[in-house]
Amino acid sequence: MAADKGAADPATLPAIFPVWMDRLQIKYLNPVIKPVAKYLPGTSVITHRGRKSGKIFETVVTTYRKGGMLAIALGHGKTDWVKNVMAAGEADIRLFRSELHLVNPRILPAGSGDASLPLLLRIQNRKVAVLVTDIA
């Protein structure tokens, strides 16, 4: 069976932020935000393993939780951490002051209009894809 190369493929995700902003965020903003992320509403640190190196990485993300589901808007489009989480099929996240294990990651393409998403995320999903995971 041929692999589906549809809109949910991380290589084709739309990005709303320019490349220079990605670099600025990675180099300067994330190191400042990471230590205080557990105190900022909606800000979390996702821990994932590299696909090739096996090294553990931490990335600052904005999360939305609804019941047993956690969702992250992918405004930066194709990123290494998304590829790592999809390849591993799991990740850990520090949400407020608790650690959660995420399983069953899937990507909803931009414009999917999934009614199960929180309202703010449904609005963002008009332009960007969303990574949705279950909380184990």
Image (spheres, helix red, strand yellow):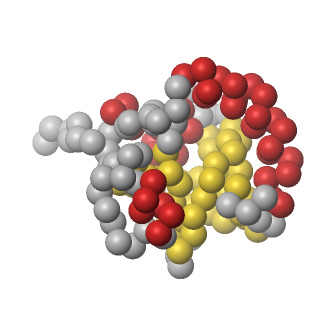
Residue for point 62% across, 27% down:
21
6 shown above or below 115: above
The image quadrant where one finds the N terminus is top left
Tell whether 111 sits left or right of 116.
Answer: left
Residue for point 56% across, 38% down:
81
| Residue 11 pos. (x, y %) | 37, 31
Does any portion of residue 32 appear in the rendered image?
Answer: yes
| Residue 97 pos. (x, y %) | 81, 66
Kindly give the residue lying farthest to the top in the view shown.
20
24 shown above or below 114: above
Kindly give the residue lying farthest to the bottom in the view shown.
67
The image quadrant where one finds the C terminus is bottom right
Residue for point 45% across, 42% down:
87
| Residue 80 pos. (x, y %) | 54, 32
| Residue 44 pos. (x, y %) | 70, 55
Q: Nearer the viewer, residue 65 or 51?
A: 65
Residue for point 59% across, 34% down:
50
Quarter assignment of residue 123 = bottom left
Q: Nearer the viewer, residue 56 or 75?
A: 75
Q: How many marks?
A: 0
Tell whether 116 sits left or right of 38.
Answer: left
Quarter assignment of residue 15 = top left
Q: Nearer the viewer, residue 128 or 136?
A: 128
Tell whether 123 sits left or right of 64.
Answer: left
Does any portion of residue 88 appear in the rendered image?
Answer: no
